Amino acid sequence: MNEEGSLSNNQMLRIAQQRWLREHSKHWNVVACWHTPNAMRRHYNGYDEHWLSKELTRYLNKVDRCIFKAAHKNKGARLPRIITLEYAEAVGWHAHGLLDCAKGMNEDETISVLKRCWDMQTERFATEKFEKHLSHFGYDNGFYLTYSLKQTYRQNEQAQGILDLRNCYFPD
């Protein structure tokens, strides 16, 4: 709050953005967290949020092709999703997602496709020791969107995050 006790423009924008995202994803209930293996980061030199966003674009295109087949290319069919990128000192850049299921699919089927595609994306770099820590998929408890957005506005230089607009998708 500023000196007069009102919210700043940045705070009002943040609140409006979170309300809009919450309203448009209120029935989505698949959550995801993606990490990349250190060997993958070293292989591609220049690991940062831009690199992770591009890597997620390739991955999510595979997911969409797997689910929607030719409709992905012909009609632009995509799995509805909100993706955020977050940096934490202990883990580096990683991503969070809140996703919906495709019509005719349930949560378990959606999670299975997401996991299988991420495993294929990272398999040549993953070590057995950390393979189980490269991703997490589950069901929303009603708070994952807030959790995913927690670092989208910097509170300090140690923790930061961004809404990955390149990889978010909202159906018409």
Image (spheres, rainbow, N blue to C red):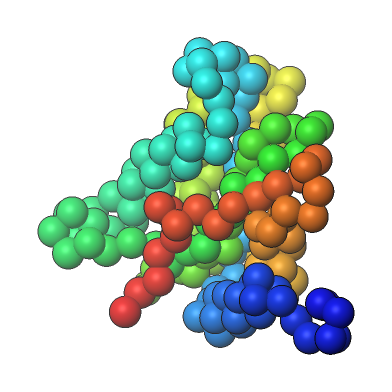
The furthest residue to the left: 74
Figure quadrant of residue 27: bottom right
Residue 105 position in % (x across, y down): 43, 68
Residue 80 position (above or below residue 84): below
Q: Quick check: can you spot residue 45?
A: yes
The furthest residue to the front: 3
Figure quadrant of residue 91: top right
Residue 33 position in % (x across, y down): 64, 48
Residue 69 position in % (x across, y down): 23, 54
Q: Residue at x 46, y 50 (%)?
A: 113
Q: Nearer the viewer, residue 40 or 117?
A: 40
Residue 132 position (above or below residue 156): above
Q: Is residue 25 left or right of residue 135?
A: left
Residue 65 position in % (x across, y down): 29, 50
Q: Is residue 90 left or right of residue 67?
A: right
Q: Nearer the viewer, residue 95 or 13?
A: 13
- Quarter of the image with the C terminus is bottom left
- Quarter of the image with the N terminus is bottom right
Q: Quick check: can you spot residue 33?
A: no
Question: Number of marks in the image?
Answer: 0
Q: Nearer the viewer, residue 108 or 159?
A: 159
Q: Is residue 42 left or right of residue 101?
A: right
Q: Is residue 123 left or right of residue 135?
A: left
Q: Residue at x 27, y 63 (%)?
A: 77
Q: Residue at x 73, y 20 (%)?
A: 129
Q: Residue at x 66, y 28 (%)?
A: 131
